[in-house]
Amino acid sequence: MAQKPSIPKGTRDFSPEEMARRNYIFDTIKRNFALCGYKQIETPAMENLQTLMGKYGEEGDRLLFKIQNSGDFLRSCCDEELVARNLVKLTNKMCEKGLRYDLTVPFARFVVQHRNELQMPFKRFQIQPVWRADRPQKGRYREFYQCDADVVGSDSLLNEVELLTLIDKVFTDLGINVAVKLNNRKVLSGIAETIGEADKIVDITVAIDKIDKIGLENVNAELREKGLGEAAIEALRPILELSGSNSEKLDVMSEILKDSETGMKGIAELREVTAALDALGHANEVQVDFSLARGLNYYTGTIIEVQAKDVVIGSITGGGRYDNLTGVFGMPGLSGVGISFGADRIYDVMTQLGLFPDDLGRTVKVMFVNFGEKEALQSLRYVKALREAGVSAMLYPDCCKMKKQMTMADADRIPFVAFVGESELGRDAIVIKSMATGEQSEYTLAAAIELLS
């Protein structure tokens, strides 16, 4: 007996209904990207390993899918290396390419490679799959889509404001109630300076970024393990327990960070961004959250994270400001800011909340029943005319029992069924039945086009 086919763990098939829902999300995001002037690019699924390695840290390098060289992939390996079974060394010799881990590093490579063709500032968006050799689990896949937008070549905080208004519009269009959280890397650096632990900024921010998941006491325990003294931990406590409006939080933090030039610059940037957002107006809540850290080593200014308010799930969008996107490729000093929508998590949120329109997946407006050769040919003429008028139409391909044809129309949620039988042939008439009401009437082709349009 043949073995049942399967797909690799961490990957998924998508049915027509699921694809209709996914495309609804992608089209909503893409439409808003285009409205803001972002230009679409695409990069190859695979990149040279030298492009990818060393850009994501040790863990990221481990999670890269590497592609085995074609042909004699062992030609560069000697017998001693094979016997030693040093997998890292062997892999580097056997593989020259890898699947992209994210869209950001390929974008950095793209900017450097095409820098003479790009007008700065350059606004780009990209919607493509990425791959990570992670352990599959609920909500985490080895193949998934990212929807990124970035502005590079500009230091203006107006770029942050535009991206935040874009986030607000996308989630309003999708019907998801979200909280948009903001922080600034400079504020985090100022906090570390103020409590006397500037050299432990990474340890501090990695710990406090978990406060929503593990609670303050467990965060403090982790900080002790990293070598922070009790005085520093106690100094940090009131910062993490700050409450009130955004302006009240910023006022308190200004007093705390008054002796930190870096921290005060971060406060000023947060004030400018939040003031602009308030002036423009926004449908979703915007929170200043000083525990937000997101990829600290990557971001240098504004940090953005979006969470759904009606579903318990991780962040569904994130991003921030970076000062040296292309430095690793020999083009230092290019500042930018970007965001990434988590399409898979957005899909899960919308499914749980029942937010997808009911008519998604309806690809055909009217199906013609097949009564035989002559009737089918006339029906095809009508189908062609309807399609030319912008109405999606089809003819059932086989002349078979009416029940079977109607069952397909019902299963595919086709709203109208058309009949062209022997009696209609001589009158150039079409009988159209509404599947919702069961009512049917006779129409000319022109009247049918008007009805179905």
Image: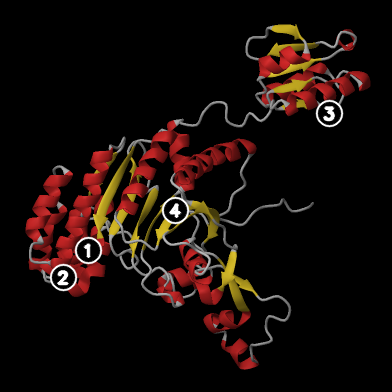
Distance of label 2 from label 4 (alpha carbons): 38 Å
Residue at 74% over, 24% down: 386
In the image, taking residue 348 as reference, residue 202 lies left or right, namely left
The percent coordinates of residue 355 (x first, y second) are 46, 31
Residue 349 is tagged as: none
Whether pointer 4 and pointer 1 mark residues with C-beta atoms closer than 8 Å, the reply is no
Q: What amino acid is found at the position of numbered circle 1 in the picture?
A: Lys
The percent coordinates of residue 324 (x first, y second) are 37, 70
The percent coordinates of residue 130 (x first, y second) are 53, 58
Distance of label 3 from label 4 (alpha carbons): 44 Å
The percent coordinates of residue 2 (x first, y second) are 78, 52
Query: Height in image: 408 above or below 331?
Result: above
Q: Which residue is mark 2?
A: 228
Q: What amino acid is found at the position of numbered circle 2 in the picture?
A: Leu
Q: Which residue is mark 4?
A: 149
Residue 186 is tagged as: 1
Q: What amino acid is found at the position of numbered circle 4 in the picture?
A: Ala
Q: Which residue is mark 3?
A: 397
